Image: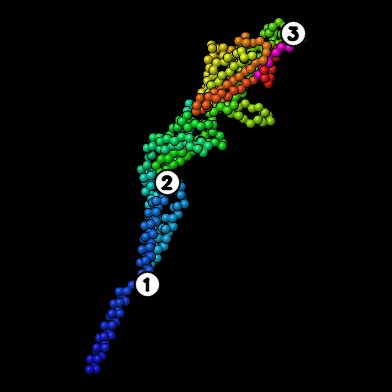
């Protein structure tokens, strides 16, 4: 009985120990549970950071929300910490490389399939009618931009023109491949460019865009000021009547066309600044008491080239240059005079040449888009008079305020 009792107790105790061992093996420890939880969180954050990196690395989002990229980077850092702890703080290099590759994957993919454009230069055509934008492409091993680009022009902060233009990177020079976008100035011109009102060209292609401020020198086309002068050419001896010591034998006509300039101590009445690429028409008349003495042929200026009907040399050579050396336009005559350094119109060729007050009027007009055909007019007044002592006399040509 006693042996049976002892044996039964031993078997019962052994059975209890077996159950305890089985329970100890089956139940996970707290540290293992914590590791599994860290792995789950780390994997979730890894997936979330990778997906958000694809979203926030888009050029269209980056252009407006550059700092948004911090969000996926922050989640990637948190994912690394949870994974590292979930793996028992082992395999540090593997976890780091995997996280970095996942975060960098959008940029690697875009470097192969996409690119960005940069406007590197703008040039004016020889006839000054177009501006060409040089556009270069960076990135995109399989790029080579080709398609339609959305182009817009703003003036003084307001959009004045936009269009979709066919575009491709199809040229190459010492700096690499590039493309050209040509813009017709007349399509978007809205007024003179200056330091306070610039023209900005913006180009959007795919997910990439760039802009450039166009040179103000290209886009100063509208006349704002006109001045003029009629210079006397004086004769003596055989040039004049018998009883005259000297006399007015002709006038040299000039005009200045362009933009106003500020006066200085050395030049209180400066001539206008030139507009070398402007197009305009100029008329000039010298008259006395409403009667025309000289009706000069209409002068046409186009991108610095000046032309008019010379009437077989009566009005000089019929061609000239404007803008290269200032805003001056010389209205040539048929006779050269060194004292005024130009060809003048002899008094004998005037329709009206008696003594009296003369008005010299110059008028400049421009057609749209350069101007609205409103005339810019400048008038100067001159008194042709004769003074003497009864035996001899002298003529003078004097500028006055009015007639």
Q: Are marks 2 and 3 in contact (CB under 8 Å)?
A: no
- Residue 87 horizontal/vertical position (percent): 37, 65
Between 4 and 350, the one lying in front of the other is: 350
**Which range is magenta?**
381-394
The question of residue 29 being in magenta is answered with no
Q: Secondary structure at mark 1?
A: helix
Q: Residue at x 54, y 23 (%)?
A: 365
Q: Residue at x 58, y 24 (%)?
A: 376
> Is the residue marked by circle 1 packed among few (<14), some (14-19), or many (20+) residues within 10 Å?
few
Q: Are marks 1 and 3 in contact (CB under 8 Å)?
A: no
Mark pair 2, 3: CA separation: 88 Å
Q: Secondary structure at mark 2?
A: helix
Q: Is residue 395 left or right of residue 166?
A: right
Which label was assigned to residue 60? 2
Residue located beneath label 1 in the image? 30
- Residue 382 horizontal/vertical position (percent): 67, 17
- Residue 103 horizontal/vertical position (percent): 39, 54
């Amino acid at each position: 009985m006693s042996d049976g009792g002892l044996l039964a107790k031993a078997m019962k105790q052994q059975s209890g120990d077996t159950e305890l061992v089985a329970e100890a093996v089956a139940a996970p420890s707290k540290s293992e549970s914590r590791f599994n939880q860290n792995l789950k969180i780390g994997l979730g954050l890894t997936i979330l950071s990778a997906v958000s990196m694809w979203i926030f690395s888009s050029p269209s989002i980056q252009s407006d929300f550059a700092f948004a990229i911090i969000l996926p980077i922050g989640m990637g850092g948190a994912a690394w910490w949870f994974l590292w702890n979930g793996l028992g703080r082992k395999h540090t290099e593997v976890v780091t490389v995997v996280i970095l590759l996942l975060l960098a994957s959008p940029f690697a993919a875009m470097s192969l399939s996409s690119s960005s454009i940069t406007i590197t230069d703008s040039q004016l055509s020889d006839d000054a009618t177009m501006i060409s934008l040089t556009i270069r492409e960076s990135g995109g091993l399989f790029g080579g931009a080709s398609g339609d680009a959305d182009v817009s022009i703003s003036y003084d902060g307001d959009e004045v023109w936009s269009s979709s233009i066919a575009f491709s990177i199809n040229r190459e020079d010492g700096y690499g491949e590039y493309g050209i976008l040509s813009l017709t100035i007349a399509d978007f011109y809205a007024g003179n460019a200056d330091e306070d009102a610039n023209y900005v060209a913006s180009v959007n292609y795919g997910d990439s865009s760039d802009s450039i401020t166009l040179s103000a020198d290209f886009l100063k086309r509208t006349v704002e000021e006109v001045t003029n002068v009629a210079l006397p050419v004086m004769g003596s001896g055989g040039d004049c009547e018998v009883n005259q010591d000297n006399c007015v034998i002709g006038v040299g006509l000039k005009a200045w066309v362009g933009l106003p300039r500020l006066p200085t101590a050395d030049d209180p009445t400066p001539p206008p600044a030139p507009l070398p690429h402007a197009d305009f028409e100029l008329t000039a008349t010298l008259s006395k008491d409403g009667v025309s003495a000289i009706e000069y042929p209409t002068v046409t200026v186009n991108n610095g080239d000046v032309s008019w009907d010379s009437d077989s040399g009566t009005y000089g050579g019929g061609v000239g240059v404007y803008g290269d050396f200032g805003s001056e336009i010389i209205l040539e005559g048929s006779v050269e005079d060194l004292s005024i350094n130009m060809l003048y119109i002899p008094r004998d060729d005037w329709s009206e040449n008696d003594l009296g007050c003369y008005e010299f009027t110059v008028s400049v007009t421009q057609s749209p888009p350069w101007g609205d055909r409103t005339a810019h007019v400048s008038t100067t007044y001159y008194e042709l008079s004769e003074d003497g002592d009864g035996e001899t006399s002298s003529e003078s040509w004097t500028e006055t305020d009015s007639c």
